[in-house]
Amino acid sequence: MGTTVAVFLLLLQVQLLESVQTKATQLYDLFEFDLVVVSNSYQFMYAAEPFNSVRLAQARVEGSVADVFALNIRVADWFSEETGKESSLLLFGVDAKPGFIRDSALRRALPLLRQRGEVVIDAFSHSDYGNLDVGAIGWIRDKEVRVVAPFELGMFFFADGSAVIANDYFPDFSGRSYLETSVGMIQLKPGASITGAKRNLRRALPADVLVFTRDELIAQEQQYFVSVKPIGIMFRAGMVIAFVVGGAILFQVLSTEITNRLNEFATFKAIGFGPGFLYGIGVIQILLFAVIGFVLAAFASVGVSTIIRNVIHLPMTLEPKLIAAVFGATILMCVVPGLVTLQRVRLADPAELY
């Protein structure tokens, strides 16, 4: 049982850290792009400082660029008359270019954003948002908005919910200038070199913006969220703590188990079996603890992660690479304290054990 608890804690922390990394960049998974242009002070999506929209027009001139797309991001508030509560909101502004939209629900909803105050709402928004059915009414910056369609995102790390509005009306609900853009997405012409286009754009654009490939943007976003933001640091610390606590639990379990079997080990030693044989028995027992504890912990973690996924829509899954990594850590957690405990058997005098 002690082994199972230790491995379960480690499995849960590893899944949480992996899911946090995935969730941190889930917004960008909604879009299809090759390169992005962001402010030179960009750190991560939630606090994306805007840059001059002229930079996208300048990027459009580069020969390998097929089209550009403006994604605007702003923290706002959502007020529901139904619940009487005001909640935090991530407001996104998008261009009417379906070719940039990877998410099918958002792509279908894009033509519905025709008038001021029409929004596509995140179906995973907090219950304080009230009714989110099509036609439901809410308020953003004291301006009435109407839900025209739902989509699924669930950016609960940043806000209680999110909504998408056409870029034509984004300034009215964000307080931002028409001349500013948060993230500029770029699609290249078929066959164009991504590295070559990135190099050319860096030369052509002023120093007030940066150019990243899709992979570079996602890697930076995940690294910042996990290494700088408190929630990422918390989960990383949780992994270390789970490993240390697991090792301590296993040391106690294995120490007790081997102590209870010292007479049997002494008998083997007294009749001539060498340290290799005794260590072999101990190692087999240790590996059995590891395998059985891991299997039981894996089943338990699947159940808990399913509950978490259904309640807060955090994409927790046990992927093969995670299973392999945690199983390796489990073996290490068991073998190291197990071998330390087995030293008692190797150094013991059989005559003193009876």
Image (spheres, helix red, strand yellow):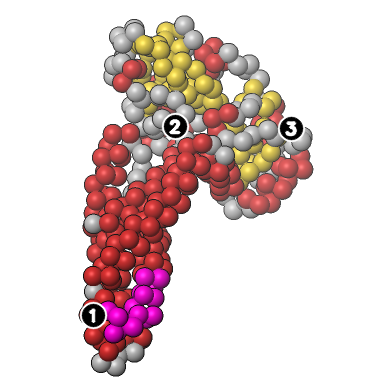
Q: Is residue 109 left or right of residue 296?
A: right
Q: Which residue is mark 1?
A: 354
Q: Is residue 44 left or right of residue 266?
A: right
Task: Find the residue positioned furthest to the bottom.
Answer: 272
Foreground pick, 52 / 175: 175
Q: Position of residue 313 (x, y in %)?
A: 33, 36
Per the image, label 3 sits on a secondary structure element best described as loop
Q: Quadrant of residue 279?
A: bottom left
Type of amino acid under label 3: Asp
The tag on residue 208 is 3
340 relative to 155, above or below: below
Q: Are marks 2 and 1 in contact (CB under 8 Å)?
A: no
22 relative to 113, above or below: below
123 relative to 321, above or below: above
Give the number of callouts. 3
Residue pictured at 52% horizontal, 21% vertical: 75
Q: Position of residue 201 (x, y in %)?
A: 71, 42
Type of amino acid under label 2: Phe
Any part of residue 206 in sight: yes
Q: Which residue is mark 2?
A: 157
Q: Which residues are magenta?
A: 339-353
Q: Dot 3, how many residues are within 10 Å of its Cα: few (below 14), some (14-19), or many (20+)? A: few
| Alpha-carbon span between mark 1 and mark 3 | 80 Å
Per the image, label 1 sits on a secondary structure element best described as loop
Residue pictured at 45% horizontal, 21% vertical: 89
**Would you say residue 217 sits in the magenta stretch?**
no
Type of amino acid under label 1: Tyr
Magenta part, dominant SS: helix
| Alpha-carbon span between mark 2 and mark 1 | 61 Å
Foreground pick, 254 / 211: 254
In what quadrant of the picture does the C terminus appear? bottom left
Query: Nearer the observer, disc 3 or disc 2?
Result: 2
